Structure formats: C-alpha cells, structure tokens
Image (tube, rainbow, N blue to C red):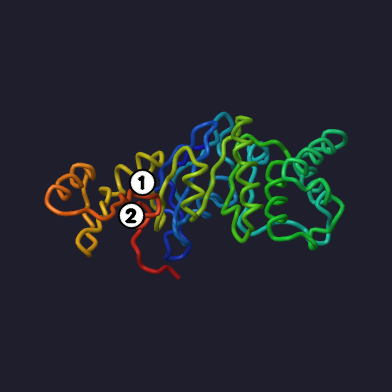
Amino acid sequence: MLTLRNVRKRFGNAVAVDDLTLEVRRGEIFGLLGPNGAGKTTTVHIAIGLLPPDEGTVAIEGFGPPGTPEVRRHLGIAPQSISLYDTLTGEQNLRFLGSIYDLSGPRLAERTDWALDFVGLADRRRDAVRTYSGGMKRRLNLAAAIIHDPDLILLDEPTVGVDPQSRNSIFDNILALKGRGRTIVYTTHYMEEAERLCDRVAIMDRGKILALDNVPALLAAHGGSPTLVVETEGTHLRIDTGNPLEELNRLAASRPIGDFRVERATLEQVFLNLTGKQLRD
C-alpha cells in the first residue's frame, strides 16, 4: 500500500532519514517504533507528501507519489500535534476538514455523524473543542483523519497524554478500522501498544530501520535467551539458557529449589538491545 525506497532527508547537517526502504502491506497495522528523534515523524511527513525526500521515492499503491491533491485524498493523517480549532465545536471541525476533501451536502453530514459516533463524541458534537479533555481531543484528531474515508491512515503517536479509557477506545477504533480493510501506519515509542496492535513492527533509530518483522520474530532474533531465576539455599541465581526446564532439572538434582521463574524477552528488551540504553534528550 505504501512503498518508500532509498529515502533520505537532511535538515542542515542533521540526517533525519537515512537510506530508508520499507513496504507497508494493504490491510495491515504497521508499527514504526523508535526513540525520540529517530526519524519517525519525518518519515510520516514524507509518506504523505508534506516533505519532499532529498533522495529516493515514495509511492501509494494504485495512485503514485503523494505529491498531488488527487493522491492525498486517499491518505488520512492524525499528527502528533493535535490539529483542531479550539473555538469551533467538534462537529464544526469535522465539517470544515471534510469540506477540504470536497465532501458536501448529505455525504458530508453522513460522514460527520459517522466519525463522531465512531470515536464516541456524538454527545459532545456541539461543544467547543477548548472544553474537551486531552483524551477527547485525541479522539477527535483521529476522527478528523478518517472523515473522508481514506485507504491509508497514518497515526503519529496517537495516544500521547491520554487517560487509560481514551487509550483503550483509540485501540478499539484502530482495530475496527483494520477490520474495515484500512491500512494503518502507527508510530509510537510505547512497546505495549506495538505488541498489542501491530501486525509488523519496524524499529527505527537515527533515520535507519534496524529491524523489521512481526513481534514473535523480533523477539526470537533480537531478544536473547530466556533467563531462569532460581532461589536456592538463600541465594538467587540468574541463568541465561535456551532450555530453562533442562537447566532447572540439572540444578534440582544437586540442591534444593525454593522458588523459580522464567523471564522471557519483551519487545522493550529488543528495542533497548537495538537502540541502546543511554538517555536521549
């Protein structure tokens, strides 16, 4: 659905995207995971035609490069910085943004009603956005991205600063959109979100893709061996092993075992193994 090939983008001496190549398949939720400054948002802006690449190509399947309004009609974007008008109501925001995509009359009214209901804001449609909570604004931001029923939806950190209820509601919305056959690119630095939602995940840092696969494959390739943690004779042993049961039996044959557990790799561990543990400012 979306293809970027050998894409580079510089801002002065800083390389934001460095020879990036990836393909997003039709109908999948594709996670773009990386620390702050990894190049995720720049990649999204290039994918929607907001920024031109210095090198490389971008194509939307069946439509071509995202450089024209005709192609961008098939894209929806929920940016990390909420893009709403605080003095307008939720309904007015959607009607205005829908009109930019040439929606009008009954079709605009139908899509506005659907989008507000979809994100659970139908009862607040006539309230000014400045009265909305942070979670409500995030949900309306999502509604604005899908008002025109796009084929490809790009969500840039869509749950930043929201409460758990709104986060779960957004997750349900995203899965429902996938169920409708939409393709979704989801950028985040929250590991649990990527594990819960994404069919495939690309881990990105310093403008490059470091690894790309489904979560189980990433865990197997980059997570390291399981760790057997055993309490025995007043001490705790931590043993990295590919066969925890065999190792436990070997220990039990020579000493009493008080308690034990197996710690397996997580996506967070994969992320840290690939991107490093140092602080990023």
Q: Residue at x 63, y 40 (%)?
A: 75
- Secondary structure, mark 2, is helix
Secondary structure under tag 1 reads strand
Q: CB atoms at circles 2 and 1 under 8 Å apart?
A: yes
Residue type at tag 1: Ala
Residue at the (60%, 56%) spot, across then down: 80
Specify whether 86 is left or right of 234. right
Viewer-proximal residue among 56 and 234 = 234
List x then y, in percent, for residue 38. 44, 58
Kind of residue at disc 2? Leu
What is the x, y in percent for residue 127? 85, 56
Question: How many neighbours does mark 1 have within 10 angstroms: few (below 14), some (14-19), or many (20 or more)?
Answer: some
Task: Using residue 185 as the reference point, say whether residue 262 is left or right of it.
Answer: left
Q: Which residue is mark 2?
A: 274
Instruction: Name the side, left or right, on which 84 lies relative to 22.
Output: right
Mark 2 is surrounded, within 10 Å at the Cα level, by few (under 14), some (14 to 19) or many (20 or more) other residues, namely some
For the residue pair 223 and 103, the one nearer the viewer reads as: 223
Q: Quadrant of residue 136?
A: bottom right
N-terminal of the pair, mark 2 or mark 1, is 1
Which residue matches tag 1?
211
Q: Is residue 259 above or below residue 149?
A: below
As drawn, is 80 to the left or to the right of 97?
A: left
Q: Which label was assigned to residue 187?
A: none
Residue 129 x, y percent position in the rendering: 79, 58
Q: CA distance from mark 2 to mark 1?
A: 8 Å
